[in-house]
Image (spheres, helix red, strand yellow):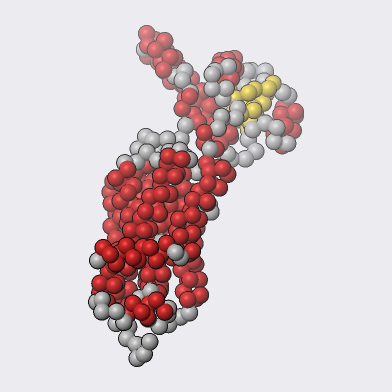
Amino acid sequence: MLHLIKYNIIVKLKNFNVVFWPLFFPLILGTLFYFAFGQMEEGDFETVPVAIVSETDADMVFIEFLKGIENSEDELIHTQEMSEDDALNALENHKISGILYTGQTPSLTVSKNGLEESILQSLLESYQNGKRTLTTIAAIHPEGMEQAVLQMSDYSDLVQQVSLGGKTTDGNAQFFYALIAMACLYGAFIGFGAAVTLQANLTPLAARRCVTPTHKLKLIVSEMLASFLLQFVNVLILLVYLRYVLHLDFEGQLSNMLLISLIGSMIGVSMGIFIGSLGRMSEGIKIGILLGISMVCSFLAGLMNNTMKNIVEQHVPIINRINPAALISDAFYCINVYDDTARYTRNLITLSIMCAALIITSFCLVRRERYDSI
């Protein structure tokens, strides 16, 4: 059996589709992703430009609050005093992100929704909430006033995104998790090649193998094991490249990531074997089906748009429950961001069931093939 597995791996490594698409293409795409936006979250945060419009009954405490924020080490905002007309004109021309009115009741005007506008809104709400709190403390427990001011003076967490598990989230991480999922599904090329070499009417190599004295069950099992092993190594190479060469922030336990990679590799190979075993369609049609399924699943998992999986979850959540790419990427999220063991386990169980169903069906399809002549 080991000799057959080794032989099968050597044969597969001579096939361009088996080497390029499952291994080199994800590495190339991952590199392009990295240079396109992989370091966006690591860049310095740009200071938010905001106009200050003073009113006759200006809240001087609010003005001092804004100066303190502007002069802090974070350099969160940059204020410019303007008349209302000038401020509205600057806002319309996108020279500023918002207008803060310093009346007795401070207010904010923005022209769109975005990160910078959300920061300004958070600053305003923080000041208003803090002012109400300090007023209450001054009236009830004036002795705690100093401590309350110290505790409320730190606004450094306004621009930090954290998950429910307490880990910092990266909006671009979904692209890389979906990339790993795509790499797993591209194991279908290896599985498809395995199915082709087991059907004597498709290739001369398959014809020669089918007339050997080796039992067909042994041929099928050795092909599957060789395919699973080769694809697992491909995904491991991608993980090592993303984590240790591109230095992406994969904080999950290595053992959990290896388990996801193993099951993900198996689902990809199983899908390829299943498609390769279907009927008597031409090889081109089968490859088209294989590519179509892989790319649609990857697209819905967030490979081209990092919000796509959330959109699907809102409108057609059942797709995320049966889409193998979404299950793989979500499993990575569970260990790197969410710390959701139950959801992680559910994803792996679903993938395992799908993999078993594809393998059993493919085995039945391949084993029952009979040929009048070869």
| Residue at the image point whose x is 51% and y is 75% from the top | 284
Residue 371 screen position, x and y as percent: 34, 87
| Residue at the outermost bottom position | 372
Give residue 207's quadrant in the image: bottom left
Residue 32 screen position, x and y as percent: 55, 47
> Toward the viewer: 117 or 357?
357
Left or right: residue 104 versus residue 265 is right
Above-or-below relation of 176 to 321: above
| Residue at the outermost top position | 143
Name the quadrant of the N terminus.
bottom left
Residue 8 screen position, x and y as percent: 35, 66
Left or right: residue 352 versus residue 30 is left
Give residue 211's quadrant in the image: bottom left
| Residue at the image point whose x is 64% and y is 18% from the top | 57
> Toward the viewer: 99 or 47?
47
Above-or-below relation of 363 to 149: below
| Residue 353 visible (yes or no) | no
| Residue at the image point whose x is 71% and y is 29% from the top | 87
